[in-house]
Amino acid sequence: MLEAGHITLTAFISPFRMERNLARQIVAEGDFIEIYCKCTLTVCEQRDVKGLYQKARLGQIPNFTGISSPYEAPENPELIIDTDQSSIDECVQRVLDYLQGKGIITAACT
């Protein structure tokens, strides 16, 4: 999609810096934008409608990020969004503002 000129957004639970660095290396310099959707573990658990965190705490789900498996926060992401401090609309606007500020999209795109 990138080669066709499209902007592609992907959302991953990517707990390890090494994996994120590998993803960054796949594309050309400047084409990878790491957005850290930061949220406290407490708020993540409160938002968990499927009860996965509870199951992980009970040992029913092994290697669960943040519970029985570590999470390595990004060291130098291009953008940090504090999702537990802002509404969804505010978070989206921050991403759009970032992309506009970098000249990746224009105001007409939004």
Image (cartoon, rainbow, N blue to C red):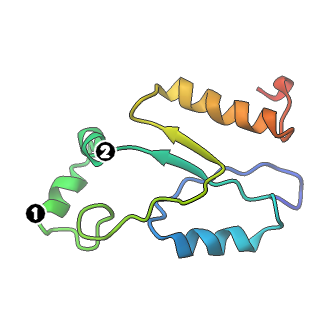
Q: Amino acid at mark 2?
A: Cys
Quarter of the picture holding the C terminus: top right
Residue highlighted by disc 2: 44
The residue under the point 49% across, 64% down is 14
| Position in image of residue 107 (x %, y %) | 83, 24
Q: Earlier in the sequence, mark 1 or mark 2?
A: 2
| Position in image of residue 46 (x %, y %) | 24, 39
10 or 104, which is in the foreground? 104
Where 29 sits versus 108, above or below?
Answer: below
Secondary structure under tag 1 reads: loop
The residue under the point 45% across, 36% down is 83
| Position in image of residue 75 (x %, y %) | 54, 60
Quarter of the picture holding the N terminus: bottom right
In screen coordinates, is 57 left or right of 98?
A: left
Mark 2: few/some/many CA within 10 Å (<14, 14-19, 20+): some
Residue 58 is tagged as: 1
In screen coordinates, is 86 left or right of 80?
A: left
